[in-house]
Amino acid sequence: MNETIEAEAVVQLTESAAKEIQAMGQRDPSQAGKHLRVFVEAGGCSGLQYGMVFDETRPGDIQREFFGVPILVDEFSASYLKGAVVDFSDALSGGGFKILNPNARQSCGCGKSFEA
């Protein structure tokens, strides 16, 4: 595993994102004890898309915690997400989770897809 990536937080959460993730976990008791996995996969309008899911730890995961929320990132996704920040806004227009990724050369208007 790349020691530089592991030594640093690959993905960071803002406090507002952490609060919303904690609230989601409280609304769905089946997610108790699970971590938030942030990942990248092929797809979307720009070639790659973001994903977030409550999940268990897997071998090779990079794990960090922000505001009491444990985050998991797999090695493949880490190279695309290094330095990214997950934010949340409850605004009526344009609200929801947003991933601010310094590695994205171009992002789709939907905010869920990007080009590396």
Image (cartoon, grey):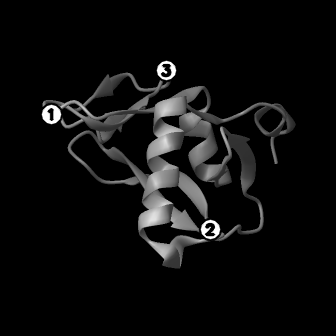
Measuring 47% from the left and 33% from the top, which residue is drawn there? 16
Measuring 59% from the left and 71% from the top, which residue is drawn there? 32
Residue underneath mark 1? 92
Task: Using the rendered image of the protein, determine whether residue 14 is visible from the camera's viewpoint.
Answer: no
Residue 90 location in percent, x, y?
A: 28, 35
Q: Which mark is residue 34?
A: 2
Q: Is residue 7 left or right of residue 81?
A: right
Residue 3 location in percent, x, y?
A: 86, 38
Measuring 52% from the left and 64% from the top, which residue is drawn there? 54
Q: Is residue 39 left or right of residue 78?
A: left
Could you classify mark 1 by the number of other residues whose Cα lies within 10 Å: few (under 14), some (14-19), or many (20 or more)?
few
Considering the numbered disc 2 on the image, is that residue within a helix, a strand or a loop?
loop
- Residue 33 vertical position relative to residue 7 in the rendered view, above or below: below
Q: Which of 106/98 is in front? A: 98
Q: Is residue 75 left or right of residue 49?
A: right
- 1 vs 2, front mark: 1
- Residue 89 vertical position relative to residue 102 in the rendered view, above or below: below
Residue underneath mark 3? 102
Residue 35 location in percent, x, y?
A: 62, 60
Q: Tell me which amino acid carries mark 2.
A: Lys
Task: Using the rendered image of the protein, determine whether residue 84 is visible from the camera's viewpoint.
Answer: yes
Q: Earlier in the sequence, mark 1 or mark 2?
A: 2
Measuring 71% from the left and 69% from the top, which residue is drawn there? 58
Q: Earlier in the sequence, mark 1 or mark 3?
A: 1
Residue 115: quarter of image: top left
Q: Tell me which amino acid carries mark 1.
A: Leu
Q: Which of 116/34 is in front? A: 34
Considering the numbered disc 3 on the image, is that residue within a helix, a strand or a loop?
loop
Mark pair 1, 2: CA separation: 29 Å
